[in-house]
Image (cartoon, grey):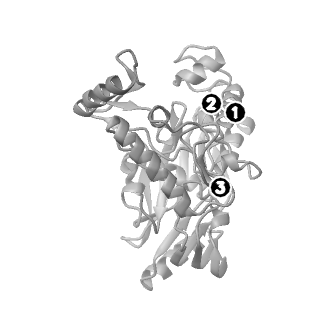
Amino acid sequence: MQVLQDAPLAPLTTFRLGGPARRLVSATTDDEIVETVRAADAAGEPLLVIGGGSNLVIGDKGFDGTALHIATTGHTLHGTRLDAAAGEVWTDLVAATVLEYGLAGNEFLAGIPGSVGATPVQNVGAYGQEVAHTVTEVVAYDRRARETVTLANADCRFSYRHSVFKAHPDRYVVLRVRFDLEDAQGRSTPVRYAEVARTLGVEQGERTGLRTARETVLELRAGKGMVLDPEDHDTWSAGSFFTNPVLDPEQQAAFLARVRDRLGPDVQPPLFPAPDQGAKTSAAWLIDRAGFGKGYGRGPARLSGKHTLALTNRGQATTDDLLALAREVRDGVRAAFGVTLVNEPVLVGVEL
């Protein structure tokens, strides 16, 4: 376990933004994680848990408390059941399950930056898959009960980019995540996402080669600047900054009326079925149609030149620069279409 005082946090985030922590602890075992959390709670010390830093926006003033960097590694496999440490790099774990073990279930989540422990918090998903499909259990330290607990899939209360861990961010610290994958004899899970199906030349619902599925997703993500490259500032982001809005029937009717008024009666915005008779639309489509194209921005924080949904740090940005751009985009979309975009990354010490 390493302990540093007044330590910079920006290098621990994919945005490369944020001020220092008063105290930074890097924990390499589950016991060290629990020990650090218990000590902070006993002292009444503010605690910030950092995994891969890919879904985190830290204020320029930093964090006046203990920042806990989850640096545990390793995983074990028993048949199709995978047990992984929270600090394991997600992209490496997906690569291992596909290339070494030939197991399907997470292959369409390739290339997503961050740590394993963060995936159930956000219910990470992309291209028709989400970890809720394969997670069986999450082992976490419960700060309220002051003990380590194991939550089954149903107890995690997964929904779109949400979970019990996100609903109660100050209660659970994820230690391990367990998955049940599929031995599909070198085939992927069924292709659910239209863009992936078109790229692969298959019908939605069909399976494809497991390795081909992973490679295709990596190529698609790279084409949108969604694969982190330390040398490419166009990828210094948190991936999708805004979630895709879910509209109830009344909101959907108002939205369609705004689209007709602004863009004409023949324009059909993307709408996909959502629970409770709602509909999900595309945040990227809204941003682009509201006038914020690829590369938009006048300062060191700009929209990605490859994808309008990613806000990027061009190398000299501050968190204030980034949030000013985020507010401009959010307010512009709301003015154009009456839909309020919600940030996907966790904000620390700042508000949108």
The residue that label 3 is drawn on is 88
Kindly identify the residue that appears in the image at 59 percent across and 52 percent down.
116
Kindly identify the residue that appears in the image at 39 percent across and 47 percent down.
331
The image shows residue 240, relative to residue 103, as above or below, that is below
In the image, taking residue 331 as reference, residue 302 lies left or right, namely right
Image spot of residue 220 (x, y percent):
65, 31
The image shows residue 158, relative to residue 67, as above or below, that is above
Instruction: Give residue 280's mark.
Output: none
The residue that label 1 is drawn on is 102
Tell which tag, 3 or 2, sits nearer the viewer.
3
Disc 1 is placed on an element classified as: loop
Give me the C-alpha separation between circle 1 and circle 3.
19 Å
The residue that label 2 is drawn on is 183
Tell which tag, 1 or 3, sits nearer the viewer.
3
Q: Quadrant of residue 56?
A: bottom right
Mark 2: amino acid:
Asp
The image shows residue 246, relative to residue 64, as above or below, that is above
User: Which quarter of the image is occupied by the N terminus?
Assistant: bottom right
The image shows residue 10, relative to residue 242, as above or below, that is below
Sooner in the amino-acid sequence: mark 1 or mark 3: 3
Residue 108 appears in the figure: yes
Kindly identify the residue that appears in the image at 67 percent across and 43 percent down.
227
